[in-house]
Image (cartoon, grey):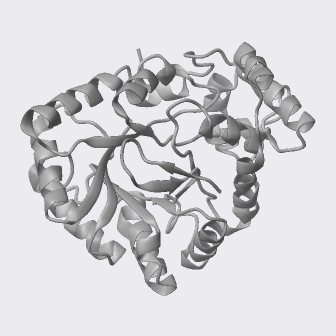
Amino acid sequence: MEYRLLGRTGMKVSELCLGCMMFGAQADEEASNRILDRALEAGINFLDTADVYSHGVSEEILGRALQRIGRRDEVVLATKFHGSMNESDPNGGGNSRKHILAACEASLRRLQTDYLDLYQVHRPESQTPADETLGALDDLVRAGKVRYLGTSTYAAWQLMEALMVARERGLNRFVCEQPPYHLLDRRLEKELVPFAQTWGVGLIPWSPLAGGMLTGKYRRGEPLPADSRFGRNPDWGKRVLQDRVFDAVEAVVALAAEKSCTPAQLSLAWCKDQPAITAPIIGPRTLEQLEQLEDNLGAVEVKLSEEDHRRLDEVAPPGRALSDWYTADFGPHLYR
């Protein structure tokens, strides 16, 4: 496992980040502990969760686990705020000062820690001025409750606005962004990647395997696996799994066979070594998928040549998307 600087900071994080979204959802506490133990054993020191994951349960499980193993100071602990934790309270979510300060205190309690290494805005919000959000986050940093600040699913223009507000007001700035990014959707290479390279912002991609599409489990002309997300939603699968997607997936499968690795390992290796990328987020959903974690960890051993990249670029062109999955989910603000 290699370690990389997070954006323009001096903090080093593992080249793969363990996503804990399924802790308390599809993975119970015992399974979550085993997943976490294996990830730490492999050298992962970067852990990502959010308050809304299982309505706080993910944070609670992670907090108890870190107390059990006694390695809190050795990990880079990241969580997020924005989603509502109290639907009956109009201030129970969002990016306002009131919600941010309350959400941080609640996350600290659930995680059983007195500081967060990385506190991220889970989604942008046009109703709240950027200076209010950044001002509240800056207060948390100055109070010693947060070390660094980040975002998730922000467009480049929104990050640029936040950067200028921070500079104008003398506030702590965002050091990283967590976007959806994988071989089948490379649109962020047009604006977000150049922005990140210019301003020293680290990128931590979520869904680097495109929701399982890049694992090779979906095959052209074959029935969708019944236990897969597209098998459970066949109409969605028909919309997303088009011929151009299969062309790319088949190229990944073929190249992986040549390199004696799995399609998932090849796809993760491609993602983690793209320009401006710090660490893709991985994480099995259940204990039964612990083998998936083992497979993902093997991505750090896979090296791609210039010719390999050229072959992949032919079927998955830079700056383009082969599927409209994320466009439908996140609207026009994220990509142009």
Q: Along the horizontal axis of the image, is 122 left or right of 23?
A: left
Query: Residue 127, image x and y in percent?
Result: 14, 33
Report the residue at 54% width, 33% height from top.
181
Q: Residue at x 43, y 59 (%)?
A: 49
**Percent coordinates x, y for residue 225 in the rendering:** 78, 43
Residue nearer the viewer, 188 or 165: 165
Above or below 208: residue 38: below
Q: Give the quarter of the figure containing the N terminus.
A: bottom right
**Viewer-closest of 8 and 112:** 8
Instruction: Give left or right: position of 104 versus 207.
Output: left
Quadrant of residue 329 within the rendered picture? top left
177 in relation to 51, above or below: above
User: In this rendering, does residue 108 appear at all?
Assistant: yes
Residue 284 is situated, as x and y percent measured from the top left of the image, at 64, 58
Q: How many marks?
A: 0
> Which residue appears farthest toward the front when viewing the image?
10
- From the viewer's side, name the closer residue of 232 and 244: 244
What's the residue at 10%, 46% (across, down)? 135
Q: Image quadrant for the C terminus?
A: top left
Q: Is residue 336 left or right of residue 207?
A: left
On the image, the x and y values in percent for residue 147 come to 28, 59
12 vs 272, left or right, is: left
The image quadrant of residue 170 is top left
User: Does residue 127 show up?
Assistant: no
**Nearer to me, 70 or 212:** 70
